Structure formats: structure tokens, C-alpha cells
Image: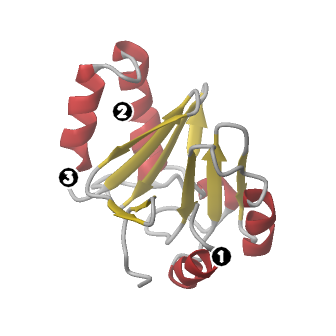
Amino acid sequence: MPTLDTLNKVQRINHHGYGFVSSKHRYKTMDYQKFLTHLSKVEIEEECIIHMRWATHGSKCRRNCHPFVENGVYFAHNGVLPIQSVNDMTDSEIFFRGQVYPLVMKYGYESKVTESMMMAAAGSSKFAMMYKGKVKLYGDYTKLNGVYYSNLRWL
């Protein structure tokens, strides 16, 4: 889990909404302090995806905070996808609902087909998914002090 100091640094840059999912908890909000309160309930042994949003597509609202979920499959994205926004949805949610989730349903969360297609789709983006408490990362993540980061702009 990132330190509070690290979370505060990331939040200064990515302050358009907050969300996380762990094997036992999930929460999305526009309020950073509420985010921290709920995140503090996550135990150290729980796998967790944390997302702090910097909006590129879709308005700044709770609905557009990551991770997105469909039938227990969670998805967060860092980057910009060449997707036109529809009905105020983010490029990330459109991609998840239209391509990622159907891929997982057709081939399985841990299938070789899903793995290779997600890696190919990532490009310069970073994707994080969770299903049944197991996290998968796609793209060029950096590991610092046991935590994977999709970017280090906050350093």
C-alpha cells in the first residue's frame, strides 16, 4: 500500500476523483478525505487497485471514477484511448464495457487469448484489472517499495 505521503503527492496531480477495489472493499468518490477513510480499511495482505483520476474524457463526477465494474470484473486505466466519448462516459469505461469485459467473458480472465489481447491493446496506456481478488496489470508499470505505479509524475 502506498504511504499517506505518496497518496497526497499523487492526489495533487490527479484530483478529479478517487476509487479503489480490494479483495474485500471497494469505493469511489469525489472527496479525497472520504477516499482515505475508506482506503484505510484495506488490510495489508489484500490485493488492491487504487485509481486517482485526471479527467481527459467525460465529466468530473463519481460515475466516471475508476475502477469500473461488471459482474465482479474491475477495470482501471491510465492513459488516453482513441475513443470518442458517448453519453459522458470516459474512454476507459467505453473500452472496458465494449471490449475488455466481453473479452474476459468469452475467453476467461486468465486465458492466453485475454492476456495477449490486453497487452496488445495497452500500447502506451496502463490497465489494471481485478477478478475474484486477483489483480492483473497490463502496460509499463514501475514497482517502488512493493507497489506498482502506472506513472511517476508525482515524484
In this rendering, position of residue 95 left or right of residue 54: left
As helix, strand or loop, the secondary structure at mark 1 comes to helix
Task: State the separation of the CA atoms marked 2 and 3.
Answer: 15 Å
In this rendering, position of residue 103 left or right of residue 39: left
Q: Position of residue 85 (x, y in %)?
A: 43, 55
As helix, strand or loop, the secondary structure at mark 3 comes to loop
Locate residue 3: give its quadrant.
Answer: bottom right
The amino acid on which the numbered mark 2 sits, given as a three-letter code, is: Gln
* Most foreground residue, 85 or 18: 18
The amino acid on which the numbered mark 3 sits, given as a three-letter code, is: Gly
Of the two numbered discs 3 and 1 on the same chain, state the one appearing first in sequence.
1
In this rendering, position of residue 60 left or right of residue 151: right
Residue at 38% over, 33% down: 100
- Pair 2/3: label in front: 3
State how the image is colored: secondary structure
Question: What crowding class fits label 2: few (fewer than 14 Cα within 10 Å), some (14-19), or many (20 or more)?
Answer: few
Locate residue 98: give its quadrant.
Answer: top left
Which residue is under mark 1? 4
Which residue is under mark 3? 123
Which residue is under mark 2? 99
Q: Position of residue 63 (x, y in %)?
A: 66, 53
The amino acid on which the numbered mark 1 sits, given as a three-letter code, is: Leu
In this rendering, position of residue 138 left or right of residue 65: left
Residue 101 vertical position relative to residue 155 in the rendered view, above or below: above
As helix, strand or loop, the secondary structure at mark 2 comes to helix
